[in-house]
Amino acid sequence: MDLDISHLRMVCAMAETGSVTRAAARMGMSQPAMSNQLRRVEEIVGGALFTRSRSGLEPTPLGGQVISRARTILSEMDTLFGDLRGPRGPQETLGLGCVHLACVGSIVARVGEALPGREVSLRIEPSSALLGDALARGHLDAALIGLMEGFDIPIAAPVVSRTLVPRYPIFVTLSENHPLAGRDEIDLSDLRDEAWIAPPGADDGSLSSLRASCRAAGFEPIVRYEAPSGAACPLVAAGHGVRMVDPSWPPHPGTVVRPLAGEPQVARLIVAWRRDRLGEEEAAALYRGLAAAYLEHTDSHPTFEAWWRAHPQVHPLL
């Protein structure tokens, strides 16, 4: 068997999702079929590409080299003809992606105002890794992407990026009946015995970041549930678990949202776009529209509004 493009996409999908199951779902394959393909690829390259850890699949040194070269090849393949077309005309639909932020309700209007005559389609995705992959493949023209501190996603030409918010804290949400709900701020170590709901974008480093923060606080988190962002709210309200949340979201009924002492979880927002789809002026207008949409929701939660106003130095671009 010779390696082909599908094998390279498969290896990259496994690296980005940290899971054979999630990678198989992304590729439209069964898990056994993907496992068999991986074994064949490893036979060809002469060694194991991944090891299993408590947080998922981890590339071996050989795997890291293969993944790096595969991403370079895939980037060139995905842009083989795209760079020849030049930026799209102003009347075409803008395919925009966004992580699950409170500002999604304002994005279509604000970006539409910034790019008059450009119809906006919006894909809301909890995983930044999947948004980055969609951009690389040309399935999206641009995206607003959230990244946990210390983690990144591969971005290669013709995709470029610009920081929107360099740094902001992640809060925790728990039931309004929780013994700690009355505190203004919660120590992460006080949540050592709680059941956690896994972050919905676990394949982009958020789960690893949660585990790392909890370990630094002296405990291993008990990750008992997996649920999309909205579906997790009833679990929290009923007292079955706690989870990290973006601070711009207002609390769901029956829950409270509190900052964590010392800000053990920190993220940033970037705007990424394809240069073969948007020219410089359109990209600048898109950035202004997304900034306007985000700013409309910095007061959605009083605690985050206070933090935002007290830390102008960490969001100088806005």
Image: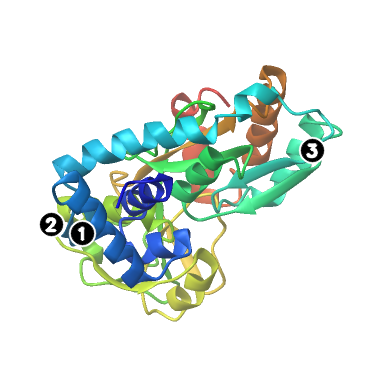
Picture layout, residue 234 above or below residue 71: below
Amino acid type, mark 1: Ser
Residue at the image point whose x is 30% and y is 56% from the top: 18
Q: Which mark is residue 63?
A: none
Q: Quadrant of residue 109?
A: top right
Look at the numbered discs 2 and 1 and tell me whether their residues touch, using CB distance below 8 Å: yes
Residue at the image point whose x is 47% and y is 53% from the top: 127
| 274 vs 200, nearest the viewer | 274
Q: Secondary structure at mark 2?
A: loop
Which of label 1 and label 3 is nearer to you?
Answer: 3
Left or right: 161 in relation to 197: right
Calculate the distance from the C-alpha at mark 1 to the C-alpha at mark 3: 44 Å
Counting from the top left corner in percent of width and height, residue 175 is at: 43, 73
Residue underneath mark 3: 112
Residue at the image point whose x is 69% and y is 22% from the top: 86
Picture layout, residue 44 above or below residue 144: below
Residue underneath mark 1: 189
Picture layout, residue 38 above or below residue 138: below
